[in-house]
């Protein structure tokens, strides 16, 4: 690797490991010290490596420096010593060595424990993703602010509030037990999917940053799969879903950064490798008797990787949406189900079901009605699209709706 | 020209301290540039890479691990340079990259 990329690369991969191992050792109440030691280690690297070059094994150098910084900190800080001495089995004998375990095994265990501590329902929803990015992915306040187009102070406050919640709740950073995994895995997966969606659906034009968020979600998901404890079918199902979505990342926007609807996407831009991986993880998820929302959503996404319409495709999608709505109702899923239903049973059947939903404050509802009326009643179709435009928030949503109206006007019908 | 010892310290408990990967790279390049400039100007008397260990002996003759003068600070490097007087040494110290992330520079003149 070029020397120029080395430090940023190491920071991306090693900073979060240092934070995880140190938090695992100290407990959540000393999370700031863990972060300070990790940051200081990298600043020391920048200073020292500038004098006589990069050491032979830079990661090992970082681990050694972090270990020494930690030992010194523990020995010098009397208060810290008293408070956590028993927890970390640090003997009062000044000569005793404190073991700071930077083995791959302990790094993995620490990261897993951190995921379960951070993805905790105690954290307010708006802080959840910011905290995960900060503590699990090593993103700084400024980077998170850039990703969410938020003010730096707002992000800082959110992260602080989330950390306070973890401390108040005395959340322990420990290997989760089998019961805890069963109880809490859903929250963990929700957070990972939220992080992924922030990247995938973000209104930010910064594609690099958005892809990074998606990649971070996938990496956290991988960590869960690497551990026997958490390698459960729904974890594979979520990874499959994220692979299918990611395969269309390039095809979703045109050169001007505008959204391209699924039907208009250039299939040759779909990433075949990701589709294959998604298919593999979906088959890997097909064990056990639990059917999670991720199984169903991955199944729907799988069928969407077949561009060609076929009766089998839309019947399968309709069936999957029926199951999904039974597990977890959402207006968006209900509207998507009707789109599939219209593909199977015809547009009239779709209109009848749609009008029963009566989601009159939702622009997707009117957009769907516009689509269903197209080819049946042009005036109605245009009227629905126009209502949708009034309700839509984003410019890209509005642009798509205007294009739909233009298309209707062009086709005599 | 006199010889001055510059000792670099960093306040380690600064909440805003976490650099971004890009900032870290810039920081690294600034250190490079700083040492290059000092070398080009013929100011370097002694330049070493110091290990991260270090010992401190206190009044009770207890030997403590770590080079820290105070709990909240960590010592980075130290260098001996040539400068005409304290004033010039201080001007040079103002350009040391350690100041970027809550650091400070201690200056001592060799007699």
Image (cartoon, coloured by chain):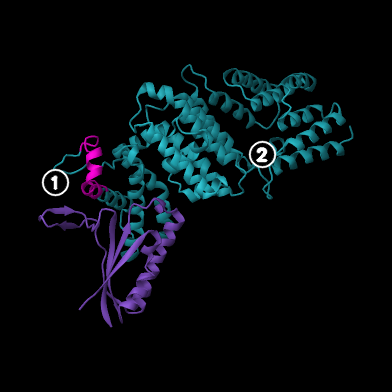
Query: What residue is drawn where x is 44% and y is 33%?
Result: A119
In the image, A321: left or right of A176? Answer: right
Residue A129 in the image: x percent, y percent? 50, 38
Q: Where does the C terminus of chain B fall, quadrant-wise?
A: bottom left
In the image, A335: left or right of A240? Answer: right
Q: Magenta includes A71?
A: yes
Residue A214 in the image: x percent, y percent? 53, 40
Residue A352 in the image: x percent, y percent? 77, 19
**Where, by quadrant of the figure, is residue A345 drawn?**
top right
**Residue A162 visible in the current orientation:** yes
- Range covered by the magenta-colored residues: A70-89
Q: Secondary structure at mark 1?
A: loop
Image vertical order of residue A310 relative to residue A275, above or below: above
Colour for chain B in the figure: purple
Q: Magenta includes A53?
A: no
Q: Earlier in the sequence, mark 2 or mark 1?
A: 1
Q: Where does label 1 land, which residue?
A: A95
Q: Secondary structure at mark 2?
A: helix
- What subunit carries mark 1? A
Residue A319 in the image: x percent, y percent? 64, 19
Image vertical order of residue A325 relative to residue A8, above or below: above
**Where, by quadrant of the figure, is residue A338 drawn?**
top right
Query: What residue is drawn where x is 28% and y is 57%?
Result: B74
Q: Please give the letter of the chain rendered in cyan.
A: A
In the image, A172: left or right of A99? Answer: right
- What subunit carries mark 2? A
Q: Where does label 2 land, which residue?
A: A267
């Amino acid at each position: 690797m070029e020397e120029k990329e080395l430090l940023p690369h190491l920071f991306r991969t090693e900073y979060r490991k240092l934070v995880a191992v140190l938090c695992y050792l100290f407990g959540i109440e000393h999370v700031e010290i863990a972060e300070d030691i990790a940051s200081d280690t990298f600043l020391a690297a920048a200073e020292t490596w500038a004098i006589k070059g990069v050491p032979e094994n830079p990661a090992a150098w970082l681990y050694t420096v972090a270990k020494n910084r930690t030992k010194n900190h523990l020995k010098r800080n009397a208060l810290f010593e008293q408070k956590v001495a028993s927890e970390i089995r640090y003997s009062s004998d000044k000569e005793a060595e404190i073991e700071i375990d930077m083995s791959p095994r302990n790094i993995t265990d620490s990261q897993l424990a951190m995921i379960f501590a951070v993805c905790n329902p105690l954290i307010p929803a708006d802080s959840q993703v910011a905290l995960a990015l900060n503590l699990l992915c090593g993103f700084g306040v400024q980077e998170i602010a850039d990703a969410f187009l938020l003010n730096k102070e707002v992000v800082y406050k959110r992260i602080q509030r989330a950390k306070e919640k973890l401390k108040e709740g005395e959340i322990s950073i420990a290997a989760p037990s089998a019961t805890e995994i069963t109880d809490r895995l859903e929250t963990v997966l929700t957070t990972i999917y939220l992080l992924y969606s922030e990247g995938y659906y973000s209104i930010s034009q910064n594609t690099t940053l958005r892809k990074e968020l998606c990649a971070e979600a996938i990496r956290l998901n991988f960590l869960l799969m690497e551990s026997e404890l958490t390698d459960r079918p729904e974890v594979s199902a979520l990874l499959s879903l994220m692979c299918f979505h990611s395969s269309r990342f390039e095809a979703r926007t045109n050169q001007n950064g505008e959204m391209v609807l699924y039907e208009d996407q250039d299939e040759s831009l779909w990433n075949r490798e990701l589709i294959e991986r998604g298919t593999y993880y979906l088959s890997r998820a097909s064990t056990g008797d639990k059917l999670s929302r991720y199984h169903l959503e991955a199944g729907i996404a799988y069928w969407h990787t077949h561009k060609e319409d076929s009766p089998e495709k839309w019947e399968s999608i309709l069936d999957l949406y029926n199951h999904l709505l039974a597990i977890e109702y959402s207006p968006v899923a209900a509207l998507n189900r009707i789109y599939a239903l219209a593909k199977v049973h015809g547009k009239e059947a779709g209109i009848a079901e749609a009008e029963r939903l009566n989601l009159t404050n939702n622009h997707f509802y009117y957009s769907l009605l516009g689509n269903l009326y197209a080819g049946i009643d042009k005036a109605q179709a245009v009227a629905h699209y126009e209502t949708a435009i009034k309700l839509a928030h984003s410019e890209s949503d509005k642009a798509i709706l205007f294009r739909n109206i233009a298309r209707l006007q062009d086709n005599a019908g | 020209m006199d010889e001055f010892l510059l000792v670099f310290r960093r306040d380690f408990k600064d909440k805003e301290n976490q650099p971004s990967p890009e900032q870290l790279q810039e920081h690294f390049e600034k250190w490079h540039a700083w040492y290059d400039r000092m070398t080009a100007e013929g100011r370097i008397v002694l330049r070493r890479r110091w290990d991260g260990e270090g010992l401190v002996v206190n009044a009770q003759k207890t030997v403590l691990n770590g080079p820290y003068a105070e709990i909240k600070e960590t010592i980075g490097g130290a260098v001996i340079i040539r400068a005409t007087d304290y004033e010039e040494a201080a001007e040079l110290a103002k350009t040391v990259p350690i100041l970027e992330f809550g650091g400070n520079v201690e200056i001592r003149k060799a007699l």
